[in-house]
């Protein structure tokens, strides 16, 4: 199944952002579909808009987010439907040399969702930091989801996914 949702997209370097309908597929193996609750506005999103990070336009902006897992793909054990999560820009593999040494921050094989989110005309979107959370739903690698207490303030814990981690 494909989900039609509203999202914030920038189509070209330094172009204005627009709210557009995008298509988000159901999760495949190792992926999670997340209903976005909150998403902070990070300076990194401005860098994407200005072309300072890459040139893989159009970009689906947003990455500092909290959401609820609405579906998981085959083999996903880290999270389950209904889990409140923050979204991380790095999903570590847990198996490479760095991860085996307990230094996951240096992981060589970080992951993002394999399937692509698209505009309605089929144009593939590049999700900011592999997340693209300025959307009603987003598709991520399940390892990009970290469970949090459902009573935690969604806006506050969303900052852990980028603002706090980037500062550390």
Image (cartoon, rainbow, N blue to C red):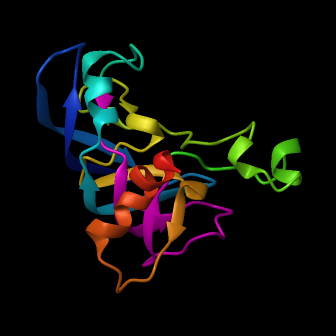
Q: Nearer the viewer, residue 31 or 121?
A: 31
Question: Where does the magenta region start and end?
Answer: 59-88
Q: Residue 155 vs residue 107: left or right?
A: left
Going 29% across and 42% down the picture, which residue do you hit?
42
Q: Position of residue 20 (x, y in %)?
A: 15, 36
Q: Position of residue 31 (x, y in %)?
A: 55, 54
Going 42% across and 17% down the picture, which residue do you hit?
54
- Residue extending farthest to the front is 168
Q: How many numbered circles does the render carry? A: 0
Is residue 70 highlighted in magenta? yes
- Quarter residue 74 falls in: bottom right
Q: Position of residue 77 (x, y in %)?
A: 66, 70
- Residue extending farthest to the bottom is 151
Q: Position of residue 103 (x, y in %)?
A: 78, 51
Is residue 82 highlighted in magenta? yes
Q: Residue 132 vs residue 81: left or right?
A: left
Q: Nearer the viewer, residue 16 or 29?
A: 16
Going 25% across and 61% down the picture, which residue do you hit?
38
Q: Nearer the viewer, residue 24 or 165?
A: 165
Q: Is residue 90 above or below residue 14?
A: below
Q: Is residue 61 visible?
A: no
Going 36% across and 58% down the picture, which residue do you hit?
159
Q: Is residue 21 visible?
A: yes
């Amino acid at each position: 199944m494909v989900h039609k949702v509203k999202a914030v997209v920038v189509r070209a370097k330094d172009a204005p952002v627009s709210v557009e309908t995008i298509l988000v597929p159901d999760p495949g193996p190792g992926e999670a579909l997340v209903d976005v609750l909150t998403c902070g506005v990070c300076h990194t999103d401005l860098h994407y808009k200005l072309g300072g990070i890459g040139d893989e336009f159009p970009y689906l902006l947003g990455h500092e987010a909290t959401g609820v897992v609405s579906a998981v793909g085959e083999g996903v054990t880290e999270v389950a439907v209904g889990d409140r999560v923050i979204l991380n820009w790095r999903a570590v593999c847990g198996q490479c040399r760095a991860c085996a040494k307990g230094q996951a921050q240096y992981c060589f094989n970080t992951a993002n969702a394999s399937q692509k989110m698209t505009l309605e005309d089929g144009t593939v979107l590049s999700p900011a930091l592999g997340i693209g959370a300025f959307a009603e739903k987003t598709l991520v690698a399940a390892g990009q989801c970290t469970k949090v207490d459902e009573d935690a303030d969604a806006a506050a814990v969303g900052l852990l996914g980028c603002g706090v981690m980037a500062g550390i």
